[in-house]
Structure formats: C-alpha cells, structure tokens
Image (cartoon, helix red, strand yellow):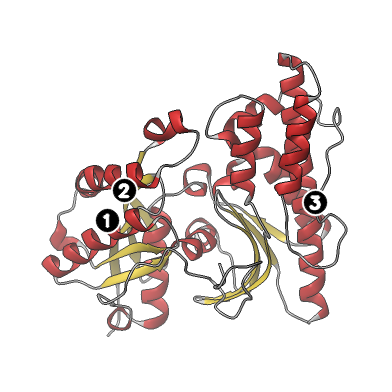
Amino acid sequence: MIIRKLKVLGIESTCDETAASIIEWNYNGKVKILSNIIHSQIKNHSDFGGVVPEIAARAHQENISYVVEKALKVSQLNSNSISAIATSCGPGLIGGLIVGASFGKSFAIASKIPFIPINHLEAHILSPRLIHNVEFPYIALLVSGGHTQILYVKGINKIDRIGTTLDDAVGETFDKGAMILKLGWPGGKIIEEYAKNGNCLKFNLPKPMFGKVGADFSFSGLKTALYRKVSSISMTKKMQFDMAASFQHTISEVLVDRCINAMSILRKKRKPFKSFVLVGGVAANEYIKIKLNNLADREGLSFFCPPLNLCTDNAAMVSWAGIEYIINFGINNVDNLDFIPRPRWPLDPKSKPIGRAKHAR
C-alpha cells in the first residue's frame, strides 16, 4: 500500500509534561506541525524541589483528555482524520506511562487506527529530522533530566550507545546545583540565567572523567564539590552569579571532552558520520549549545539541534517518531496494542548495565 498522506497524533506523559501533537506528512516529504500542546506541571512540583511521581500521575490523568482535545481543535481535525496514534511508552515514571498508554490504546481502538509505542529517548534523538535534513548515520548527545548518553544513530531502531553517565544526568545535576545555590527549581534555566551575569572562570570546580579513556560521564563529584565550596564561603548575589557560571562552564567542558572521545572511538572503528546532533531538555541551554556547535565546527561536522520548543519534552517529537516508523516499516507493521509500558527501555539493548543495575538504561 502506497501512503500518500499521514496525520499522526502523538502523546507524551513520561515525566511532568502532559502533551499532545498532530503532525501531517505528505508523500513528497512536506511536513507540517498542525498542533503541539504542552501542559507543564512545574507548579505542581516546585514546592518539593523535584518531580513527585504520584502527583505527576494524577496530573496526567486530569489533563490528558484536555490536551488531546485541544490538539485536535487547533489542528481543525476530528478523531476520524487521524491515521495513527504514537505514544511515549518508556522510559519514564510508570504512573504517567500507564496514563498515556491507556489513553492512546483506547483512542486507537475507538478510532480503529494503529497504536505505535515510542521510546521517548528515540523520539528526542529523531527530533532534529523533523526540522532539518539530518542523514543517517549520525552521532547524538542526549542530555536530559534523567539521561546523559552519547549515541551512534544508524537508523530507526538502530542505535549503539557509546557513552553514558555512571551516576547523575546533566539535567539532574543542574537541578541539584540550583538547590545547593538556593536558586529554586527547575535548575537548568535558573542557572543559565544567573550564569549570564557571572564569571565562568571564577571558581575552579573539578571535571569528573575529564581526559579519561572512554566516553562515559560522572557528575556526582561535581555536585559534592559545589556543596563544599558553597559551604565554605559567605554567599552573596555576585557569588551566586559566579558560581552558576563556573558550574555551567565545568559541565560544558566535560560534555565537550567526552564527545571528542566518542568521535575518536567511532573513527577508529571506521564508523561513518557527518552530523552531530544535540537533543534533550538541556539542549535548550544556549551556552552548552554554542560550545558543542563549536566542537562540531572543529571536527568538520554539521551541527543540528531542534528549536527550543522541541528540546524539552513534547509530543511533536513523538508524532514524528511514529511517522518515521510508519515510513520505514509500513503502517500495518507498527501497530502494537499489546505493548506494556516500560519504566526502563534502553535504546541499545546490547549495552552493559551501569554499576549495580540489573538492566541497561
């Protein structure tokens, strides 16, 4: 069957954003985001300094019907116009995953359309292809609240993990750093704003794993060092600016170093790649984006990063991942109503578990 047009509804509910989006794809390659609705739960969790799973699940349950209805309304479509529904089914908080998957499956059954389970991380990694002509294979740095990985993306569902964090993710590190500096939550955006007024070379913070063999990350020692530094000085507003700038700069230096190693590893294995992509919520950080864009220039690579509204968790990237799967495998081959949501769903099943974990992340 030749597919000439698709309208795919995407649902995202892995953490603290309830989102729905509809993307239209035409056989000539033209793509249009018809709607991209995001309901943030920041107010629900800000008093706790982080996402509370039970509160998140309840908020998803309360908001999912609303965001899907609004996505349809903004797109000027009804449920009968939808070709398939793609839903983030992991990794993430199990309560939110169950809410999203249950709604998606019910919608698919009622509308008699395919249900496509999507790996939330793969949706991030494929998101630059929604906007730019990024050809496989490419190297991707995924930096989010829960994951920090360097990946070799060979194609749809063909991803090798080159490096990963041994402890905290970059997004989590920013959150905890902001709490240490008493700046509030979520930390990434706040630290970036404070850093604009600070001297990034004022404080010499340790760079975990910097210069070491391999492409893995570690950030727990950096948090400890920040805490000790803050505890040893009288904190002023100027100090907060300088500390935020130094903290952000240190993280960016580690990211660049690890990516250089990953590129070297791939080249030694004669693995081709012409592009370097930056994805995930931390990709919204302009300072880090500039540092990695400069790295790509030095390495002779094309650099791609999705626009700000597609960096953080959203449903447009889920819709797009669904379209990618349909194009590659056929609409009748991606329908999977039996799929069970997975709080852990590694992009590279062959990758080794980290530390004492029983399964790869």
Query: How would you rate the neighbour count of disc 1 (Cα within 10 Å): few for under 14, some for 14-19, many for 20 or more?
Result: many
Instruction: Tell me which residue sits at (32%, 83%) in the image.
Output: 333
The quadrant where residue 252 appears = top right
Q: Can residue 9 be seen?
A: no
278 left or right of 125 in image: right
Q: Quadrant of residue 107?
A: bottom left
Indicate which disc, 1 or 2, sits on the residue closer to the N terminus.
Answer: 2
State the SS at label 2: helix
Relative to 261, is 82 on the left or the right? left
Q: Residue furthest front?
A: 356
Q: Disc 3 marks which residue?
A: 208
Residue at the (75%, 26%) spot, across then down = 230
Decide which of tag 3 and tag 2 comes sooner along the chain: 2
The amino acid type found where label 3 is placed reads Pro
- How crowded is the residue under tag 2: few (<14 C-alpha within 10 Å), some, or many (20+)? many
Q: Mark 3 to mark 2: distance in Å?
A: 35 Å
Q: Position of residue 274 (x, y in %)?
A: 71, 69
Task: Tell me: residue 31, above or below residue 349.
Answer: above
Does 30 sit above or below residue 43? below
Q: Are marks 1 and 2 in contact (CB under 8 Å)?
A: yes
Q: Amino acid at mark 1?
A: Val
Task: Provide the residue designation for mark 1.
Answer: 99
Q: In x, y percent, where is residue 227? A: 73, 33
* Image position, residue 27 (x, y; %): 36, 71
Q: The C terminus lies in which quarter of the figure?
A: bottom right
Residue 34 appears in view: yes
Measure the alpha-carbon separation of dots 1 and 2.
Answer: 7 Å
Give the label on residue 57, or none: 2
Do the CB atoms of the residues marked 3 and 2 lie less than 8 Å apart? no
